[in-house]
Image (tube, grey):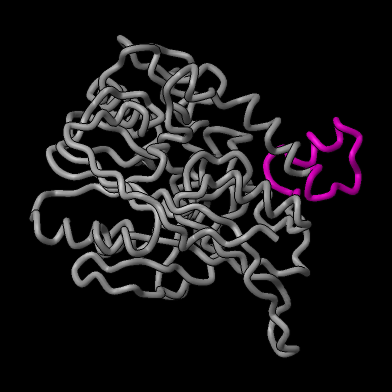
Amino acid sequence: METDKTGGVGEMKDCLNYSLKNHNTFGIDAQCDRFLEYSNVQEAQQVAAILRSSGCPFLIIGSGSNLLLTKNFEGIVVHSAIKGIACTASSADSSSEKGVYIACGSGETWDDVVDWCTSQGYGNLVNLSLIPGEVGASAVQNIGAYGSEVGTYISAIHAVEVSSGNVVTILSDDCEYGYRSSRFKHEWRNRYLITSVVYFLPTSEPLHVDYGNIREELRLRHIEQPTAADLRQTIIHIRNAKLPDPKTEGNAGSFFMNPVVPKEKYLELAALYPGMPHYTVDASHEKIPAGWMIEQCGWKGRTIGRAGVHDKQALVLVNRGGASGSEIVSLCEAIRQDVFSRFGIEIFPEVNIV
């Protein structure tokens, strides 16, 4: 077991007129008036005190993998550098579900957490492999992929309350996790500096292979009974095949959320588009892939100015080189209008546009 470093001592980073180019995966060259980075709970409390006393606008970021900057940020940008992954406890009560608790620093890279858990034999998070970002942001966004969402596994979130500087523990049930949503994105926005997240991973949970083309890819690899490591490598292969590397072509992964529509709307469209992909949400709602609708509108692979749509996955908008945030926003709005005109469905950005 790795030593839990989530309370480690470091030196708080405090910079003026700071470039954010390396803090957003679109590679937008914007800057902020001040940049604060905390590496332990005590420094998070110091940051909270600075935020209270300054009265300046502030923005809390992770790795910037879900962020589109459209201009310089006139205020303070805050980032967590708290690291550490540790198995903290196992549930021993025979009346409760058996599993393990994993505590992770909010500045830990998300995929490193998945890799660590997989190496320890815990396959619960493996469908979330290679999702960019950090632990703290994953709990805000409720990241998800291939039929899994991180909110399912979050037990508690430790944080510092900005308004008081108090250290608090927030239970998952209070976060109101939904599709790419939580209270942190809405009424709790800018209320907390997350310091660590605790996940509960049930030991009896089977691997999830019946989503998208996972099972087909396993078949092509001649794997009938996949291990967690097999499934992780398969999902990494699938993602790498269709998603661009931000280091070579700036992007924020999936730019749009997949819309959930009433069953009646789905049936109306299914009659017009036989074979239209969909995922049943409940008896009254279906989820329709936004990428499929964007592709039907002819946007896949198109470029306007220095912004474009990825040629392998229409859900991904890319910086072809030197694009401004406003260029990407203009492309986003043109796509949204076309999708609504053709399908009568509004699609909304998953990315935080600032």
Q: Quadrant of residue 14?
A: top left
Res. 180 in view: no
In the image: residue 28, left or right of residue 289:
left
Q: Which residues are magenta?
A: 209-230
- The residue lying toward the viewer, choosing from 90 and 241, is 90
Is residue 86 at all visible to an observer of this figure? yes
The relative height of residue 72 versus residue 121 in the rendered view (above or below) is above
Q: Position of residue 13 (x, y in %)?
A: 30, 44
- Residue 339, given in percent of the width and then of the height, sits at 37, 31
Task: Pick the quarter of the image with the N terminus.
Answer: bottom right
Q: In this orientation, which residue lies closer to the viewer: 55 or 222?
A: 55
Residue positioned 61% across, 65% down in the render: 102
Q: Is residue 151 depicted above or below 129 in this figure? A: below
Residue 298 location, x and y as percent? 45, 18
Q: Nearer the viewer, residue 75 or 98?
A: 75
Task: Name which residue lies at 19% across and 35% down.
Answer: 32
As for residue 219 lying within the magenta part, the answer is yes
Q: Residue at x 47, y 30 (%)?
A: 315
Q: Quadrant of the C terminus?
A: top left
User: How many numbered discs sit on the rendered protein?
Assistant: 0
The location of residue 136, given as percent across then percent down, is: 43, 54
The quadrant where residue 327 appears:
top left
Q: Is residue 227 magenta?
A: yes
Residue 214 appears left or right of 254: right
Above-or-below relation of 248 to 129? above
Residue at 24% over, 69% down:
165
